[in-house]
Amino acid sequence: MRVRRSRRPPGSRRSDRYSLRRGIYLLPSLFTVGNMLCGFAAVLYAIHFQLERACWLILLAGLLDGLDGRIARLTRTTSEFGKEYDSLADVVSFGIAPAVLAYQWGLHGAGRWGWAATFLFLVAGSVRLARFNVKAGLADRRFFVGLPIPAGAGALTLMVLVDPEPLADQPQAVAASFFVFLVSVLMVSTIQYRSFKEWNLRRRLPATAFFVFALILAVFVFTPLPAMALLCAAYLVGGPVEMLIRKLSRRPAATAQQEAPFQVTSAPTPPNPEHP
């Protein structure tokens, strides 16, 4: 006996594909929600002086922030909503959470300078995100204009995580406030920082480069905190150093172009009428 297959209505396949596509759009947004959740939990832990937990939650938020954009690109589900929602989550996780963490850690000992530095960090981070959204698609993908806010949040987080004991005296609090202010200036600056988006992990690497990557991975496994602090410090300094190198390399070329029109050229020798 043959079993007759029920015919599906003509629009059912299209609706199935539409529901699947809606589900795929949810996937990167769930990572963004996880990013925001980590930032909110970090604020709560920092308020109750559980600073180490707050630090690790901010670092976890940074990992989720890197995954949501990559997953959206892999699944081809990038959208304007996702970009704006990701920026709102970044304000919580990389703006408010590190500012509260640094203030609870010891910047409150600097008085007005402490809360002013943390508030300026929050303002600089939000301005950095707004500028990034406005210039998205117009700037060079190889570089970020200004220090990215996750890197700024990582700098404050590692500053606390390396020595989570609260600061005891006012000079240390003032020095930490100055560091927070310096990171804020780097975020709103026009210094170009490498995004490493042009790196292709599928290409073949020489044996030396593979050994260097393996060595870096081993250092991260055995000494994660010093390795992360050193890497973050190198990234902070790398942008200004690379900008200075570019300016110094362009200056000799510009000087040569300016001196070129004033060089005296010898006039051509007139022909001798006695010789053909």
Image: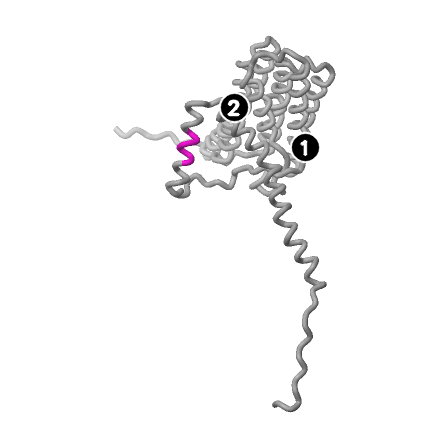
- Residue 188 shows which numbered tag? 1
Q: Nearer the viewer, residue 234 or 86?
A: 234
Q: Count every numbered label the image shows and give the total.
A: 2
Circle 1 SS class: helix
Identity of the amino acid at label 2?
A: Leu
Q: Nearer the viewer, residue 133 or 104?
A: 104
Q: Residue at x 37, y 41 (%)?
A: 207
In reply to whether residue 216 is colored magenta, the answer given is yes
Colour setup of the view = one colour
Name the outermost residue toward the left: 1
Q: CA distance from mark 1 to mark 2?
A: 29 Å
Identity of the amino acid at label 1?
A: Val
* In the displayed structure image, the side of residue 225 where residue 48 appears, left or right: right
Crowdedness near tag 1: few (<14), some (14–19) or many (≥20) residues, C-alpha within 10 Å = many
Q: Residue at x 45, y 23 (%)?
A: 223
Residue 96 appears at what percent x and percent y? 64, 20
Circle 2 SS class: helix
Secondary structure that dominates the magenta span: helix
Dot placed on the residue nearer the N-terminal end, 1 or 2: 2
Residue 254 appears at what percent x and percent y? 67, 54
Crowdedness near tag 2: few (<14), some (14–19) or many (≥20) residues, C-alpha within 10 Å = few
| Residue 27 vertical placement versus 114 (above, below) | below
Q: Residue at x 58, y 27 (%)?
A: 150
Name the outermost residue toward the right: 112
Region in magenta: 212-217
- For the C terminus, the image quarter is bottom right
- Residue 30 shows which numbered tag? 2
